């Protein structure tokens, strides 16, 4: 039997580990006609995540943060094993940000015995990240859909740093008639331009020094695109700059439209520059709008 005594609260931030506990809170808020903002995360929270919480607080009456390292969206076992898990630090940051509720389920709560379903979003998942991380978007879409059903928020907040993920979620919500407003939030960067990411803490010092070249190359590329240069040539130029800077391997660099992320083959005044590249054993992704830095 689930009771309020099962729910632990610290400085007004409640922590739930089961769907039953979570729904107690959600039902109480719904009875008051309160809007609920949702920030789904895999933990190892940084200032980028906390900016989503801040925007959610300004937008909604209540804010839920989920912390769940979803095993089904990792295509490499070593990546799952190495993913940072810092739950005590994460909880402290959620309390400091005045999140109303943290949902921290274990794997069996999200994927109980006999679980045998998945959500698969077509087309947009078949390029860029989809080419290099088989199964990633199926796992991500499935867990986000499940979390949406568990939390039943009015709004959900995602960073533009994972732009393809954001567009996949928008497509899923549209196609499945999920009544949630998806809000994309600006990428938060370190002072040197590196996009904030939980994986940044895995970079060796010498690689961390190189990493800002990624954003610098994207900014230079955006300027070239605005001047009318061919997207294919600009993509090659970015790869050349990254190799000169010391990146070990480049998975992809490309220019795409802002909606379904179809590759652009002719000069355009709008779109997105996307890329994924490696420093040592750490894979970094980044993207910017063509008009960023204008």
Image (cartoon, helix red, strand yellow):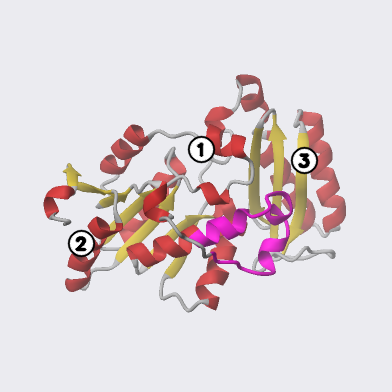
Which residue is located at x 86 percent, y 58 percent? 230
Residue denoted by label 3: 250
**What residue sits 31% from the left and 55% below the top?**
64
Residue that carries the numbered disc 2 in the rendered image: 24
Q: Which residue is mark 1?
A: 198
As measured in the structure, the alpha-carbon distance from the residue carrying label 2 to the one carrying label 3 is: 47 Å
The answer to whether 138 is drawn above or below residue 249 in the figure is: below
Label 2, secondary structure: give it.
helix
* Among the two numbered marks 3 and 1 on one chain, the one whose residue lies closer to the N terminus: 1
* Tag 1 secondary structure: helix
Mark toward the viewer: 2 or 3: 2
User: Which secondary structure, mark 3?
Assistant: strand
Answer few, some or many: residues within 10 Å of disc 3's Cα (few below 14, many 20 plus, some between 14 and 19): some
Outermost residue on the front side: it is 114
Q: Is residue 120 magenta?
A: yes
Residue 239, how many percent across, how many down?
Answer: 81, 41
Query: What residue appears at the point 55 percent right and 39 percent down from the top-left corner?
Result: 80
Residue 80 or residue 62, whichever sits in front: 80
Q: Is residue 26 above or below residue 40?
A: below
Q: Which residues are magenta?
A: 118-142
Pointer 2 or 3: first along the chain: 2
């Amino acid at each position: 039997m689930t009771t309020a005594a099962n729910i632990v609260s610290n400085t007004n931030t409640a922590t739930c580990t089961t769907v039953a506990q979570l729904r107690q809170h959600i039902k109480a808020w719904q009875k008051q006609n309160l809007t609920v903002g949702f920030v789904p995360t895999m933990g190892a929270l940084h200032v980028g995540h906390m900016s989503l919480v801040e925007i959610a607080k300004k937008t909604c009456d209540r804010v839920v943060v989920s912390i769940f390292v979803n095993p089904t969206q990792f295509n490499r076992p070593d990546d799952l094993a190495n993913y940072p898990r810092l739950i005590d630090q994460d909880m402290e940051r959620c309390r400091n940000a005045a999140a109303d509720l943290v949902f921290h389920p274990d794997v069996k709560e999200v994927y109980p015995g006999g679980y045998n379903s998945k959500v698969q979003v077509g087309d947009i998942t078949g390029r860029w990240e989809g080419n290099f991380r088989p199964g990633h978007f199926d796992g991500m879409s499935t867990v986000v859909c499940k979390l949406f059903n568990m939390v039943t928020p009015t709004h959900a907040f995602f960073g533009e740093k994972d732009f393809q993920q954001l567009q996949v979620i928008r497509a899923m919500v549209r196609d499945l008639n999920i009544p949630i407003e998806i809000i994309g939030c600006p990428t938060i960067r370190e002072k040197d331009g590196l996009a904030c990411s939980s994986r940044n803490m895995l970079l060796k010092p010498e690689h961390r020094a190189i990493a800002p070249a990624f954003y610098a190359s994207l900014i230079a590329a955006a300027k070239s695109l605005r001047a009318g240069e061919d997207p294919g040539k600009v993509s090659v130029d970015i790869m050349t700059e990254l190799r000169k800077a010391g990146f070990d391997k480049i998975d992809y660099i490309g220019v795409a439209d802002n909606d379904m992320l179809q590759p652009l083959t002719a000069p355009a005044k709008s779109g997105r520059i996307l890329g994924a590249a490696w420093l040592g054993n750490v894979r970094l992704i980044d993207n910017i709008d063509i008009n960023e830095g204008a």
